[in-house]
Image: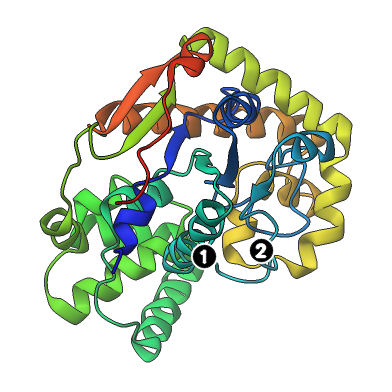
Amino acid sequence: MISEQALLDTAIYLTGPTASGKTAAGILLAEHLDGEILSLDSIAVYRGMDIGTAKPSAAERARVPHHLLDIADPSETYSVARYRDRAIETVQEILARGKQPIFVGGTPFYLKALIRGLFDGPPTDQSLRDEILEKAQEAAHEENTNAASVLHSWLVESDPALAAKIHPNDEKRSLRGLEVFQLTGTPLSEQQEQHAHTRSPDEVSVYYLDLPRPELYARINARTEKMFEQGLVEEVLGLREKMGLTARQAAGYREVIDYLDGKISLEDAKRLVAQHTRNLAKRQVTWMRNLVECQPITVEELLTIKPRPPLA
């Protein structure tokens, strides 16, 4: 019987920081290798969140089949475990058509789950989560801040290694770290480290687009302007009542929500979207350079990539 990991190892992975040109590069690679693309983006899974995630256009999707886009409502919390299960099914379908599966996107957590496996941790304890969140909301009210910031500050005390990897506004992941620590007495980061195992380039093909920092930042600034011109504000206006916590925290969306709530001006929203996206890109670059499986590649070198060997 073929293992799930063996199936995922038949894929080629093309990643890189946001706005690095992954979509166009992925299409070129897929056309070169007769492949189909699977989105590797934790926000592009949500229906209706198109402009802010820079989803492939209809013309781009017509050139190469794309998968794992628009598979969840923005009200949902789409977990990495659900994503991995769906990815495995889709890889099987692509292989059955005699095509090369190619993952394209920039969500590091998803990438690591695909190439190294997933550490699930203990089952969710909803009553404990509710208790932690309620205390955080009370503390946030007293400190005139938000619950996400309080949860993150608590995580710094119990699991500083995990807190360093989590954005202070990422309430979901901070809450999970606190929950696991209280359930097991061991930091989640420590458990994840024990579970992690590196892969060699012979076992898995992972490439990342590595652009010079000034070029990358210029692309981010230009894309931010383009998103607002394309109607990002109107997109958020139509979605905001349906958006859950994960969707609301996405860069480009949380800033526009603040604008619509009257907290900041439109110009400030644009400035913050560009700034937060640059910060995100910087974290992505650091993460990818530190992931031993990732091999830097330029667009010009894409056509030197060879297909993965077929399953035995």
Foreground residue among 245 and 205 = 205
Is residue 100 shown left or right of residue 76? left
Residue 312 vs 102, above or below: the answer is below
Query: Is label 2 or label 1 in front?
Result: 1
Q: Residue at x 55, y 16 (%)?
A: 216
Task: Measuring from the top left, give residue 31's x and y in whole percent.
Answer: 63, 28
User: Circle 1 — which element?
Assistant: helix
- Say if mark 2 contacts mark 1, CB within 8 Å: yes
**Disc 2 crowd, CA 10 A, few/some/many (<14, 14-19, 20+):** some
Q: Residue at x 76, y 34 (%)?
A: 63
Task: Measuring from the top left, give residue 32's x and y in whole percent.
Answer: 58, 24
**Disc 1 crowd, CA 10 A, few/some/many (<14, 14-19, 20+):** some
Q: Residue at x 79, y 33 (%)?
A: 227
Task: Measuring from the top left, give residue 261's x and y in whole percent.
Answer: 78, 55
Residue picked out by circle 2: 71
Is residue 306 shown left or right of residue 76? left
User: Circle 2 — which element?
Assistant: loop
Residue picked out by circle 1: 86
